[in-house]
Amino acid sequence: MEKRLDDDQPSLGYAWYVVGLLTLANISSFLDRQILALLVVPMKRDMHLSDTKLSLLMGLSFALFYTIFGIIISNRGYRHGPPEVMQRLAKGEPVDPKEYYFRGTPVFETSAENYKWITRYIFIATGTGERRVDRVILDFYKLL
């Protein structure tokens, strides 16, 4: 049986399904934009597109898609520790999270009805102990 905190929160299985689906959508979007960027010159030449028409194709459609279907995440955080630990963090070196203090307050925004529930809660984020050069892994906790 899957654990549910309340009726508004989806099941854990469904949450992972959505994470997988959003990951695939993100990969598809990235590849789509990269392919389009590589084909700008041939498309402009073959289709006789002006710079304005090309910018509408590449910019406006992208912005509209993410405005309607995306989840916007704003994350404000505070990290504090001894100067030598902060320098190691700045260099991207692995640092045990017990050596510094980190808390964040993420805010989620979306116009998608299925995910409106995340806009009604306050969340706190903490470091999980795994900070990598290219990303920070966080644990999110919903305040009741």
Image: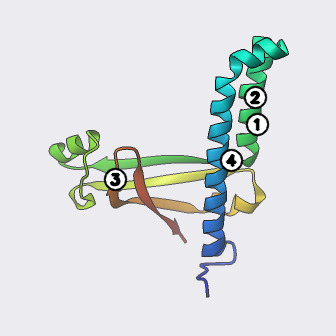
Residue 105 vertical placement versus 91 (above, below): below
* Residue 60, label in figure: 2
Residue pointed to by mark 3: 131
Circle 4 crowding by C-alpha within 10 Å: few under 14, some 14–19, many from 20: some
Asked if marks 1 and 2 touch (Cβ < 8 Å), the reply is: yes
Secondary structure state at the residue bearing disc 2 = helix
Separation of residues labelled 1 and 2 (CA atoms): 6 Å
- Please report whichever mark, 2 or 3, sits nearer to the chain's N-terminal start: 2
Separation of residues labelled 4 and 2 (CA atoms): 15 Å
Residue pointed to by mark 1: 64
The picture quadrant where one finds residue 41 is top right
* On-image quarter of the C terminus: bottom right
Separation of residues labelled 2 and 3 (CA atoms): 35 Å
Residue pointed to by mark 4: 70
Three-letter amino acid code at disc 4? Gly
- Please report whichever mark, 3 or 1, sits nearer to the chain's N-terminal start: 1
* Residue 77, label in figure: none
At which x and y percent is residue 62?
72, 34
Horizontally, residue 114 falls left or right of residue 143, namely right
- Please report whichever mark, 4 or 3, sits nearer to the chain's N-terminal start: 4
